[in-house]
Amino acid sequence: MFEDYRGVWVFIEQNEGEIEGVSLELLGAGRKLADKLSVPLSGVLLGLEIKELCPEIISYGADQVFVVDHAVLKDYRTESYMKGVILLAEKYKPEIFLYGATPNGKDLASAVATDLSTGLTADTTMLDVDLDNRLLEASRPAFGGNIMATILCKKHRPQMGTVRPKVMKALEKDNSRIGKIIEEEIFLQEEDMRTKVLKIVKDVTKKARLTDAHVVVAGGKGMGDLQGFQLIHELAETIGATVGGTRDVVEAGWLPHEQQVGQTGETITPKIYFAIGISGAIQHIVGMKNSEFIIAINKDPNAPIFDVATYGIVGDAMEIVPRLIEQFKVLQKEKGGEVSYV
């Protein structure tokens, strides 16, 4: 029944002619799956006047790019994009189809899965394939992050999943790669669309985003209480870092949700990540495990956070953090001002 379904596809999300980073990351993950299955890796690109993006998609690992270019696809809308994707999926029959877990990616993936009557694994953190049965193994934390569940779609195709930004790693760009561009036409009329794009309002806030930070100081319930958590803020201010925290910290009201790191918060990849008073539940680790350097401070030598840490300090954070702050301030004074830590 599934013999006609072949190939790994990645939905390429673009915004005003700029490819979203998560799409490039998914091309890296998709390349590994496609190589294991010995099938092509394809990018799926929808929009208006977007064909010029195809060489970049190919340079990041795709063998070919399916392009649907139409005025009605200029801005993202569920209805129009869903029709474009379904047109391609029904004609070319991919066996695996990956989307970024962005607001648009999640919206589109769920709509496509419903229309194609197939399964969809949301917020996947690990991807692999069972070669004997050609099954996508999509893993994600479950039961509050206490276990990792591997979800299979045995009876339907394509097998689909959304993956959050920063979870996978993009391949190095290779401009020498050569691929195929396949253009498909679609019949759409603006007057038939049930929704209209009236205005796009861009976020103009100047507040630093946790996902963009190079250095993050994150604290957990091991800081004791809100007063103890102020040490996290003080250390972050001393070294010019951004503050993050665990789900328990957010639920306790010590930090707003937008500063939560983990499966139900943000997935980040800073150069330096301080995990202070954080035991290391799966739910939290999936949100920061790809950080370049992880420095963990915990009084429990068996805390799971040490399994992913680059450097670990076993001890009471309430004693260690003040000493770190003091030493950073001494270093800054010796250097005559600000010090770069990345």
Image (spheres, rainbow, N blue to C red):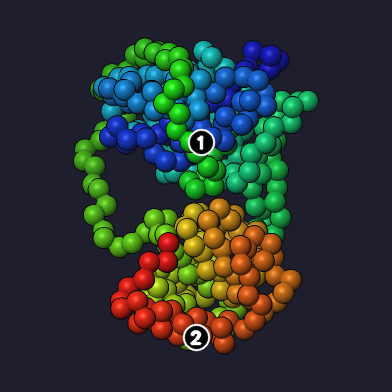
Q: Nearer the viewer, residue 341 or 254?
A: 341
**Hey, which quadrant is residue 309 in on the image?**
bottom right
Comparing 103 with 54, the one in front is 54
Q: Given the image, on which type of amino acid does mark 1 rest?
A: Leu
- Which of the image's four quarters has the N terminus? top right
* In the foreground, 24 or 86: 24
* Residue at the (27%, 52%) spot, across then down: 203
Q: How many marks?
A: 2
Q: State the residue at coordinates (30%, 78%).
A: 336
Residue type at numbered disc 2: Pro
- Is tag 1's residue or tag 2's residue first in the polypeptide sequence? 1
Considering every residue shown, the one lying at the far front of the view is 334
Secondary structure beneath dot 2 equals helix
Q: Is residue 174 left or right of residue 39?
A: left
Residue 231 visible, this angle = no
Please, which residue is most extreme toward the left here? 199
Tell me residue 175's x, y (percent): 41, 26
* Relative vertical location of residue 168 with respect to residue 219 in this rendering, above or below: above
Residue 85 image offset from top left, x and y in percent: 45, 23
Q: Nearer the viewer, residue 39 or 315?
A: 315
Distance Cα–Cα, label 1 vs label 2: 40 Å
- Specify the quadrant that holds the C terminus: bottom left
| Residue position for label 2 | 322
Disc 1 designates what residue?
171
In the image: residue 312, left or right of residue 49: right
Q: Characterize the local packing of mark 2: few (<14), some (14-19) or many (20 or more) Cα atoms within 10 angstroms.
A: some
Residue under the image location 42 percent in, 44 percent down: 103
Q: Residues within 10 Å of mark 1 (few under 14, many from 20)?
A: some
* Image coordinates for residue 113, horizontal then vertical, percent: 54, 31
